[in-house]
Amino acid sequence: MKRIVVASFLIAVIGVGTFTVINPLSGEEPQFQAISESALTDYEYVIPEGTGKLIDAGEAISIIPAELQVHVGESIRIVNNDERGHIVGIFFVGPGETLSQSFTSAGTLSGGCTIHPSGAFTLQVLEQA
Amino acid sequence: MKPRPLRLLNSVLGGALLSLTFAGVSHADAPGPTDYKSTITRIELTEGSTLPEGVDISVEGHDAFLKVQVREGTTVDISGYEGEQYLRIDAECAVFENQRAMSTWYNQERFGSDIDHSLVNHELPADWKQIGSNCAVAWHDHRLHYMSRSAPINAQPGDVLVIDSIPITVAGIDVEVHVESVLVERPSRDVPLIAAAFALIISTLVLRVRLAWIATTVAAVLAMVLGGAQYFWSAPETGPQLTVIIIPLLAGIAGGWAVRSRHTPEAITSIGAQLLGGVLLAVWVSQRAGVVTSALLPTSLPYSVDRAGTSVIATTAVVSIAYASLMLRQLASANAKPVGQG
């Protein structure tokens, strides 16, 4: 009996240790869920064709705000008509692609942004009002 | 002589303190595991100009740093994100950093650091602090890589996440360094899982023949090899942390002490050393946890060797801690009996 207890303890500790190694802990981050491209959304942004070339030419592009505050249950759509992919925080929208996501939990995320002059984007998802 | 429980407490507290100390020291943002590969796609010069001999511009740490190396006599000026004077290399190879530049503080860490605005002032003349003397400088340029700890949503391996350019001035010539960063596919988890299972089996066998004492030392030696391969792979200008070698070195010393003292009457010393060795190895593993899952690793070894080795060390650390804890419990029971019987 004692050996079983010891073995169980070892396996539990090793299991937790392995899980920790394989799944590094993350902070309080909002969660997202993909939604249909035809669904109505609360926030919609369109990246026009030629945006990448304008960026290369040194123009300041401002399609999205540097900070966006939304609520759980709301959704966002980013339509990329450009010939290159764009990063908006942690959203990547490939050339010619449309990204539609709903916010399923609260939190804050920051990241780079190719469609704001600051080059940064912070998304704050608040609990439902 | 201190009572036995007090010495045990000292041993464990000492181990915890050491771990915390090293965790703090190693907070500086040296190259680590990553899922992104940044490359220089093109270097554009002022029309009609050529760079002097010996100029080398490269990406270090897969996607973390941009590095500029020149020969003595060639000057370099690097502007910050707001056009301010940020870094420079003079003709005598001395490297300087402007302490009043926003970029100096924002570039301390890979994903951007908090800026103490009381230190930043772009209106005053630059406050140059010498940070090197070898004609080379590397810095976290946030235009070089994807800027979030979270994986990008909707991106697939091969997607170009970043396309940008970084202006620098070399010997008075304007240079535009065009860069891009690509998402790289993550590896299979088979190798680390198989290695962890293998280590678990070996550990169990070792426990049966009561050789657990040597496991910590063997794992510490392996950790030193992996840590050494990480330390020497990184360019010195990127600030590789010596803790990746020192922590396993201390774990090895603790493990050796445990082996040496295991047959002495002071068994608690041996158990404490074993526990300390296990804790130090666990700290080392926690600092390198990303090597198991990330696509690109900071090492000169084959990636599968680093992943498998780190998994083996993680398992050994847990087994060492568990074994030492069990020994402590047995010792406590043995000590408690006479009291209970008396």
Image (cartoon, coloured by chain):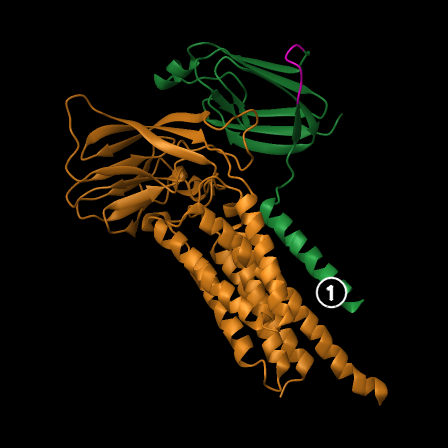
Residue behind mark 1: A6
Q: Is residue B5 above or below residue B12?
A: below
> Is residue B340 left or right of A121 when viewed as pictured?
right
In the picture, one chain is orange; tell me its letter.
Answer: B
Q: Nearer the viewer, residue B253 or B315?
A: B315
Residue A123, percent from left and from top = 60, 28
Residue drawn at (48%, 15%), measured in percent from left and top?
A: A95
Quadrant including the C terminus of chain B: bottom right
How packed mark 1 is, by other alpha carbons closer than 10 Å (few <14, some 14-19, many 20 or more), is some
Residue B16 in sight in this render: yes
Q: Number of marks in the image?
A: 1
Residue A41, percent from left and from top = 67, 14
Residue B44, percent from left and from top = 25, 25
Quadrant including the N terminus of chain B: bottom right
- Identity of the amino acid at label 1? Val
Task: Pinpoint the chain carrying mark 1.
Answer: A
Q: Nearer the viewer, residue B306 or B235?
A: B306
Q: Nearer the viewer, residue B17 or B197?
A: B197
Residue B13 in sight in this render: no
Q: Please, what is the dominant secondary structure of the magenta stretch?
A: loop
Q: Residue furthest right?
A: B341
Q: Is residue B250 above or below residue B239?
A: below
The shade of chain A is green
Name the secondary structure under disc 1: helix
Residue drawn at (38%, 51%), measured in percent from left and top?
A: B239
Q: Is residue B127 above or below residue B282?
A: above
> Is residue B72 left or right of A84 when viewed as pictured?
left
Q: Is residue B258 above or below residue A125?
A: below
Please give the range of residues in magenta.
A34-38
Residue A18, percent from left and from top = 62, 51
Residue drawn at (59%, 65%), measured in percent from left and top?
A: B16
Inspect the magenta stretch and tell me whether residue A35 lies in it: yes
